[in-house]
Structure formats: C-alpha cells, structure tokens
Amino acid sequence: MNDPNLLIRPVTAADDDRLWAMLEPVFRAGDSYALDPAISRADALNWWRGGTHRAFMLDDGVQSLGSYYICPNQQGGGAHVCNCGFVTAPDARGRGVARLLLDHALTEARSRGFRAMQFNFVVATNTRAVALWQANGFDIVGRLPGAFRHPDQGFVDALVMYRHL
Amino acid sequence: MNDPNLLIRPVTAADDDRLWAMLEPVFRAGDSYALDPAISRADALNWWRGGTHRAFMLDDGVQSLGSYYICPNQQGGGAHVCNCGFVTAPDARGRGVARLLLDHALTEARSRGFRAMQFNFVVATNTRAVALWQANGFDIVGRLPGAFRHPDQGFVDALVMYRHL
C-alpha cells in the first residue's frame, strides 16, 4: 500500500469502537488467539491496550484498517525481548495491513531498545501468518505439540517464532 | 526422600514469611526467573500465589522445604496446557525437593484435566533444572536465542520445555 493517507498512531480511548470491531470477530472465531472466545468487550480492550501493552492503529484517512500492540515479553533478564499482537479490520483483509503494522512494530521495537521480537503462540494452521512472519525474518524456534485446540481442526501445534532486531 | 512427615498442601496467607524466604534469594539472584530482581515482597507473593496461579507448599513437619504453582499457560484454545514454577528453600537444596514437587504437580495437573505441561522460559545455563525436567519426561521443544540476560554470563538462550500428561 502506497496510500499517502496511511498513518499509524497510538491508540486512544476514542478508538474503542473501532478497535472492538476488529478484535471481536477474531477473538470470537477462537482460531488464532489463545483467549477465551467469549471474552467481554471490556476485557478484550483492556488486554489489547492495557497493562504493559502499548497499542497502535493504522488509519487511511477514512477508516481504521488494523492495530497492533507491543510489550516486553518477559520481565527482568528477559525484558529486552518484545512481544506483539496484530489484528486487521474485517473489510481491510488482503491489503497488506499486517505487513505495514509489522514494519512499524519492528521500528518501534528498535527505538524502544528491544533486541528481539518473539511470538509465543502462532497457531500452526494459521499458515498465512506463519508465512508472513517467515518472509519478514522470523524463524520458527519452537513447536508446541497439540498446544492449541482449534474449533474445527481439534488439537493442532502452536509455533514459537523469533527474530533479532 | 521417604520421610513420612513430608506433606504437600495448598499455600495459605499464613505462609507468606516462609514463602518469601524461599522466593527472595531466587528472585534477587536474577539468574533463573525472568522477573525484576528488585521485585517487592508483595508483588512476588501476589505473582506466585495470585491470579490464575494455585500454589502448594512442601513441609517436613518442622519446616517448609519448597513450593510450586500451577496455572493454565494460555486461555481459550490453549487452556488445556498448564504452566508451573518451582522453588526450593535455600537450606533444603540437594534433597530432591524439586522432584517431589514436580511429581505432585504432574498429578495435580492431570486431576485438573490438563493435557500437557509447558515451561516457557528455562534459562539454558540452569543445567540442573534442564536435566531434571528432561529426566522427567520433558522435551526441549524450543530455543530462544539470547532471550535471557544473565547477571554474570550475559545474553544466554532460554528453552521451552514440554511434556504430555
């Protein structure tokens, strides 16, 4: 996407409706995030943009296309590795939103002094995500056998993916 | 240990002093748990036995020898895999405490319906722990390169270990 109107900026409380519109279908589907599919709107928003998470939103001047959060993956001796989560608005799929968000996240991570980025739990059946992360420098450094109960496919593996920054 | 006085039972608030006496040296050392080495007593106790964690204590009739917690490692589609953390009292090291606690944890995990146990972040330099887990059915299913900043050894790997129940 080369749209000059594209802008990634911090999420604010005014984004709650837009953010929930993205998160709800993904969390309810229960096939990618290891969260209770029945999670409440409030809990979902608090998780996405609360605690140690810092969340960003991608707008195109008309609507919001996607969001991501970044946070330290561990504390203490593990605090130099960050973790991120990504979501694309339902009507913005197939437009390269995740890639744009990842580019921003990698820059943001470096500017915050993180030395690596880790995804703890990429559902192996989410092949588009796995391929995207691999194309952008992430290695599969771990495989958790049967660690995810997929709503349609039963017990499937989850992957740990990692890249240095 | 075949001491008939050994008992593993749930942690209560009355255990705070005993529990902190075990946790403080381990957390302050900062070489095994990915927690802030300066963590407060209150935060440490809340983390060990609060939230989704359920904590147990091993006593020998005279003193407390060790403790562990068990919790779901993920929510939703990942809630069938548990996570545990273990600590041995400083003056009880070398007596097989971790092994006793692990045996209890495996039984507890099965009785709670968990299908697997995962350790997310075993510092690779903690070779005694790695060997103990391997001797008890855990596989190294992931290696996080340089994910832990060891206070003496600099950046070292952390391991993801996993076993079915």
Image (cartoon, coloured by chain):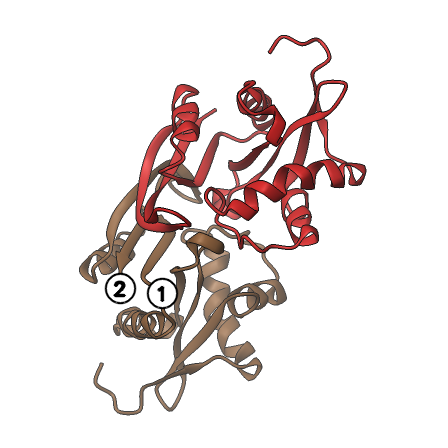
Chain colours: A brown, B red
Q: Which mark is residue A114?
A: 1
Q: Quadrant of the N terminus of chain B?
A: top right
- Which amino acid type is marked by label 2? Leu
Work out which residue is located at the far left of the displayed protein and give it: A135
Residue A165's tag is 2
Location of residue A153 in the rendering, given as x and y in whole percent from the top left corner: 37, 40
- Say which chain tag 2 marks: A
Residue B37 percent across, percent down from the top left: 54, 52
Up/down of A64 relative to A102, above or below: below
**Which residue is at the front of the view, B23 or B99?**
B23
Q: Amino acid at mark 1?
A: Phe
Q: CA distance from mark 2 to mark 1?
A: 7 Å
Please report whichever mark, 2 or 1, sits nearer to the chain's N-terminal start: 1
Q: Quadrant of residue A17?
A: bottom right
Please tell me the numbered disc located at residue A89. none
The residue at the far right in this view is B14
- Label 2: which secondary element: loop
Which quarter of the picture shows residue B97?
top right
Where residue A65 sits: x, y (%)? Answer: 37, 78
The reply to whether the C-beta atoms of the residues labelled 2 and 1 are less than 8 Å apart is yes
Chain for numbered disc 1: A
Determine if residue A24 is in view: yes
